[in-house]
Amino acid sequence: MLDHLGDTLWRVGDAEGAVDAWRQVVEILEDTERRERLSQIYLFIQGRQWGLFVADPDEIHERQFGRLLEDAREKLRIAERGGTPAVTATFEELSAAGKPGEADDGRP
């Protein structure tokens, strides 16, 4: 949500707000205590709920949040250097490019 908020703020000209939102994404996803809590939850769900271990908690975390973290870091890097970061396409842009229905890029 914060990544998309940053994209939206960037589009409406609030570069400072966008950078703040992307920084929050990075801070949250780099928080080792949060990651450890999520790892415990992943283990609990696999062991207690499913009764089998499907994947290592770090692998699950990376699949869920790895790309999001990389994208937020890249947007910050570009914006902080005065550039224009790539932001999520709007439905209108996707439609014009002949890609209707692909607005959801799979990120949480």
Image (spheres, helix red, strand yellow):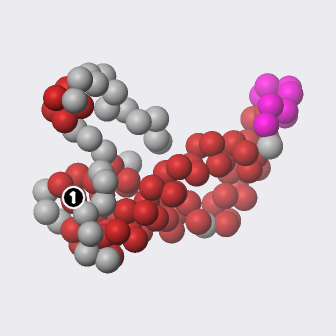
Would you place residue 64 above or below residue 24 in this image?
Answer: above
**x and y, in percent, of residue 97 in the image:** 22, 29
Asked if residue 60 lies left or right of residue 78, the reply is right
**x and y, in percent, of residue 84 in the image:** 25, 63
Residue 102 among those drawn in magenta = no
Q: Quadrant of residue 76?
A: bottom left
Would you place residue 80 above or below residue 88 in this image?
Answer: below
| Three-letter code for the amino acid on which mark 1 is drawn | Leu
**x and y, in percent, of residue 3 in the image:** 37, 53
Residue that extends furthest to the left in the rendered view of this protein: 12
Magenta residues (range): 47-55
Q: Secondary structure at mark 1?
A: helix
Asked if residue 54 lies left or right of residue 86, the reply is right
Q: Quadrant of residue 19?
A: bottom left
The residue closer to the viewer here, 85 or 64, is: 85
* Residue at horizontal 67 percent and vertical 66 percent from the top: 32
Residue 41 visible? The answer is no
**x and y, in percent, of residue 93 in the image:** 19, 35
* Residue at horizontal 74 percent and vertical 50 percent from the top: 58
* Residue at horizontal 40 percent and vertical 71 percent from the top: 77
The residue to which callout 1 is attached is: 9
The residue closer to the viewer here, 54 or 44, is: 54
